[in-house]
Image (tube, helix red, strand yellow):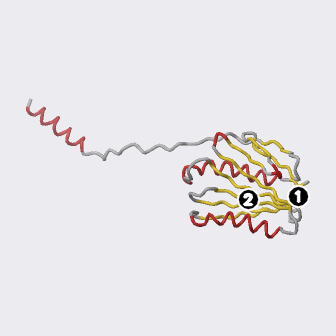
Amino acid sequence: MKNFILLILFISILNSCGSDSLPKPKPYLKLQYPEASYIKVSPDCPYNFEVSELATINFKDKCWSTIAYPELKATIHITYRPVNNNLDEILKETEKLTYEHTIKADAINMIPYENFEKKVFGKLFNVEGNVATNIQFQVTDSVKHVLAGALYFYTKPNYDSIIPAIKYIEKDIIHLVETLEWE
């Protein structure tokens, strides 16, 4: 009996000398967004474009508009400005608004866009970090029209948490710019 107890004790000691037990890793939320489908919006304005069917668009005075994503708690604010021999002034003003985020931004990346056939030329600014607006864009025909937009979330900026939503809406903004037509 003594030998049996010693054998069990010896086996228990050997079994306890295994690998360290580790806590379970913290799970991360995997966000899945629906496949985007778009509808053409033709307001009584000198432009038209396509927006996501998941968004709600609302036009205001001066052909300004908002494109709301209620489920993502986000809105794209769009401003329209006619050009009256002041194109450089308007474009500098919109870029100035983007670069005011330099204080809090980790980086500001600019992506140019050109479509000579449709006369659509612009820039998309990706502002990384805990800033008020992570995506801004400006588009012009270089003669008569400027359309500018900024993406805002109705939450405290936490870039790491909202980056999946930013990337999802960024695709919609790129689609908006690619489908933009001046009238």
Q: Position of residue 39 (x, y in %)?
A: 81, 42
The residue at 83%/67% (across/down) is 87
C-beta proximity under 8 Å, tags 2 and 1: no
Image position, residue 34 (x, y; %): 68, 39
Q: Inspect the image, locate mark 1, and give the three-letter code of the amino acid beneath it.
A: Lys
Q: Position of residue 119 (x, y in %)?
A: 88, 61
Residue at 76%, 58% (x, y): give it: 148
Determine which quarter of the picture holds residue 23.
Answer: top left
Q: Which of the marked residues, 2 or 1, is nearer the chain's N terminus?
A: 1
Relative side of 164 to 180, left or right = left
At label 2, the amino acid type is Phe
Q: Which circle marks residue 118 in the picture?
A: 1
Compared to 103, does 5 lie above or below? above
Which residue is label 2 attached to?
137
- On the picture, is 18 further left or further right than 83? left
Q: Secondary structure at mark 1?
A: loop
Q: Position of residue 67 (x, y in %)?
A: 73, 46
Camera-side residue: 47 or 3? 47
Question: Would you call the spot at circle 1 few (<14 residues within 10 Å), some (14-19), or many (20 or more)?
Answer: few
Instruction: Out of 83 and 73, give the one closest to the viewer.
Output: 83
Q: CA distance from mark 2 to mark 1?
A: 17 Å
Q: Is residue 147 left or right of residue 33?
A: right
Residue 5 appears left or right of 87: left
Which quarter shows the C terminus?
A: bottom right
Label 2 element class: strand
Q: Residues within 10 Å of mark 2 (few under 14, many from 20)?
A: many
Q: Which residue reaches farthest front?
A: 61
> Could you tell me which residue is drawn at 86 percent across and 52 percent down?
47
